[in-house]
Amino acid sequence: MATTGIPTKLQEQHYQISPDYVRISVAAAIELGLAPGRINGCSCNCINLLQNYPQGCAANCSYCGLARERPGLAEENSFIRVDWPLYETDLIAEKIAQKEAESSVGRVCIAQVQDHRATRDLIDMADRVHKAAPEVPISGLVTATLLDEDDLHEIKQAGVDIIGVGLDAVSEDLFLRTRGKLAKGPHRWDQHWEIVRAARRIYGPMKVNCHLIVGLGETDKEMFDMIFQLKSEQIAGYLFSFNPEPGTEMQDVPRAPLERWRRIQYVKYLIENCDLPPDALEFNDAGDLIRLAPETNSAKLAFDSGLAFMTNGCPDREGVMACNRPYGSYRPGEEYRDYPFLPDSQEREVIASQTKLNEIWDIAEQQIS
Ligand code: SF4
Ligand code: SF4
């Protein structure tokens, strides 16, 4: 467990903590010229920042590298399997402003962790970035447990235009087991939904998103029910592929098979972009997707476009996906899970062979792959 014996008041002197310090994804550090290297095949157009406190995160989600009961010091832990170097917040704000002056920055995202200072600090950090680079859109990836409606208004006033909520688990039962009481964590499903819906009212349609993790133990049916629900409320759903973190409660749980992940990506795309109705999907008693019967042409074209297999993330100011999180859900050298760029024709062939859609595709004349 990552603990500190130093009282809260003295921690600011002993540790480099938020709001004055912030962690930044390696991809974003490269993009801002703070770290050497390059990201294979794509650029990182979203600067992802993460709050830093001596105890990491005080929640205890069973799959997360920052969880309270994960062994080791918080500063040694990784988040979504990549290291997050620490910098002064003001330096990051300055670098963002410099980059914006050269060529526009797609988006900045500030992620909260569970800490009693985290809401006050999110507002402070968003304010610093917004003052340095007022044109750059900012997302707040919030910890719903810490917030009420007033906080959501204050966060907006500080310059945040999109709220992301790590819902992660797509059913109440799974949420309880992986994030809530049964995981010895503070999060509550009902409270998360109160904040998601309050944010939806305050920030507007498609200005709120829920992160959804594939592979925590949900059924296909639960995943698609959630995607339909979010669509009906004009809330974005962003898919993440579970990737076990060493040292966490779920370290030995296998990832979702690639075939299942690809089908979920594709069907989600059809629901959101081609108005696929719920009755186009059929499930067995275990909740596995066993039949897909879409309208013919648009579904085939959608598959061939490759768009369904790109990373889901917040857009830039032109509405183009900015948050592409290279290596967020796979390691360098591994198969892509979500593509941080539009897959080319060769990659689309690989995707088709991975998806094996013919096994569930119910339109004889429209064979895929
Ligand atoms: S609240 Fe977020 S950062 Fe904290 S343990 Fe859960 S998933 Fe990890
Ligand atoms: S999709 Fe990316 S930018 Fe948007 S809230 Fe999630 S991590 Fe932040």
Image (cartoon, rainbow, N blue to C red):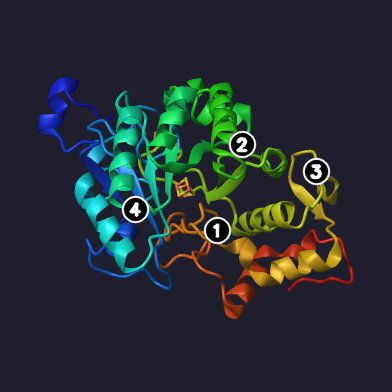
What x and y, as percent, mark residue 141? Answer: 44, 40
The x, y position of residue 335, in whole percent, is 50, 66
Q: Which residue is mark 4?
A: 82
Q: Amino acid at mark 1?
A: Gly
Quarter containing the C terminus: bottom right
Q: Are marks 3 and 1 in contact (CB under 8 Å)?
A: no
Q: CA gap, disc 3 to disc 1?
A: 38 Å
- Closer-to-camera residue (319/229): 319
Q: Amino acid at mark 2?
A: Val
Q: Name the element at disc 2.
A: loop
Determine which of the numbered discs, if any, sits on residue 319 in the image: 1
Q: Nearer the viewer, residue 240 or 126?
A: 126
Compared across the picture, whether 201 is left or right of 50 comes to right
- Residue at 81% across / 45% down in the picture? 278
Q: Are marks 2 and 3 in contact (CB under 8 Å)?
A: no
**Mark number, residue 284:** 3
Q: Earlier in the sequence, mark 4 or mark 3?
A: 4
